[in-house]
Image (cartoon, grey):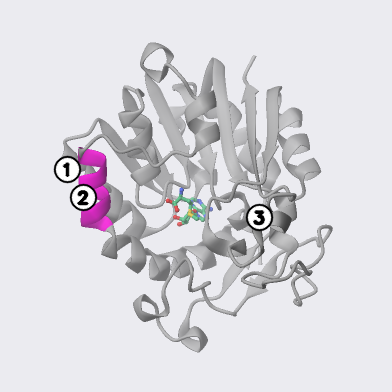
Amino acid sequence: MNTREYHQANRMAWNEAAAQYERDEQERTEYLRKGGKNLMEPELRLLTDLDQWCKRAIHLQCAGGTDTLSLWNHGAHEVIGIDISDRMIGVAERKTVALDAPARWYRCDILDTPAELNGTADLVYTGRGALNWLNDLDAWADVILRLLKPGGLLFVFEGHPMANIWSMESPELRLDPDPRYGNYFHEGAIEDTSGWPTVYIPADVVPPVEQQAKKYEHLWTMGHILTALAQSGLQLERLEEYPLLYWDGLKNLPPEIRDKLPNTFTLMMRKP
Ligand SMILES: C[S@@+](CC[C@H](N)C(=O)[O-])C[C@H]1O[C@@H](n2cnc3c(N)ncnc32)[C@H](O)[C@@H]1O
């Protein structure tokens, strides 16, 4: 399979998972209507004064648009979301109509983000379970470079590559028993037929595991991520690592262990 084929297979899988985002849609819309921001502490601390410098934010892998529209609530004048899932973009579009928000959505592989957006973003934002779905980080980095204005900022808040290797939902720290996941240096696409983690997508909204679409993930190392972006021409401003979790994947680990691990990171890079 080539990169586009892996991504199209993931489109099918995400169309199934989108059922959970449809279930949350009304609640999330009301949250946003009240000015809610689904942003975490590092994002709120590091992404400041958007109203003064961010005319357009482009969110790659925007899912149902809650985080994208949170950037609008946080000060971005206009937000644009790109996602490969038809149903996710449907959720985002309905929220936009309900909120009369200055938002636009494109359903496409991020690698096919339309050229009409080139050089228009003050901010490209992505993360929280995004990079592991991509098969080609060099192509990803090139898309970011072409979307940013000169001087524009890339902001990634993402699961730390180290956090992917642990056994999920285990009360003890141990490597994932699947040798592909339990290896920081695993290379190549991982075909996953084990179904969605139920802490994220409850079993009652998706088909039975054996009927679900196959998913293809990649375990990118920190070296892969930084090198792809640096080689595209972006300049490093900040890399922070935290024990903070952005989802419940390692929630059963005792806090005294979990809080000593790198679970998330923020990466800020700028287009010269
Ligand atoms: C975990 S979600 C992103 C996190 C998001 N902040 C949220 O609200 O959950 C991953 C998203 O990436 C999208 N996606 C996966 N591969 C993609 C690709 N090649 N191009 C665009 N979107 C993609 C999926 O459809 C899904 O909506």
Residue 135: give its label.
3
Residue 47: give its label.
none
Give, as a three-letter code, the residue at label 3.
Asn
Characterize the local packing of mark 1: few (<14), some (14-19) or many (20 or more) Cα atoms within 10 angstroms. few
Characterize the local packing of mark 3: few (<14), some (14-19) or many (20 or more) Cα atoms within 10 angstroms. many
The residue drawn where x is 61% and y is 71% is 169
**Left of 35 or right of it: where is 192?**
right
Q: Is residue 60 above or below residue 116?
A: below
**On the rendered image, what quadrant is the C terminus found in?**
top right
Tag 2 residue: 94
Which one is in front in this view, the residue at disc 1 or the one at disc 3? Answer: 1
| Mark nearer the N terminus (1 vs 3) | 1
Q: Which residue is at the far front?
A: 256
Tag 1 residue: 97
**What segment is highlighted magenta in the picture?**
25-33
Between residue 100 and residue 8, name the one nearer to us: 100
**Residue at mark 1 to residue at mark 3: CA–CA distance:** 33 Å
**Residue at mark 2 to residue at mark 3: CA–CA distance:** 30 Å
Whole-percent x, y for residue 120 in the image: 44, 22
- Secondary element under disc 2, as helix, strand or loop, is helix
Whole-percent x, y for residue 229 in the image: 70, 33
- Residues at badges 1 and 2 in contact (C-beta under 8 Å)? yes
**On the rendered image, what quadrant is the N terminus found in?**
bottom right
Between residue 262 and residue 150, name the one nearer to us: 262
Q: Is mark 3 within 8 Å of ligand 1?
A: yes
Q: Is residue 97 above or below residue 11?
A: above
The residue drawn where x is 75% and y is 53% is 162
Query: Magenta-highlighted stretch: main secondary structure?
Result: helix
Characterize the local packing of mark 2: few (<14), some (14-19) or many (20 or more) Cα atoms within 10 angstroms. some
Q: Quadrant of residue 153?
A: top right
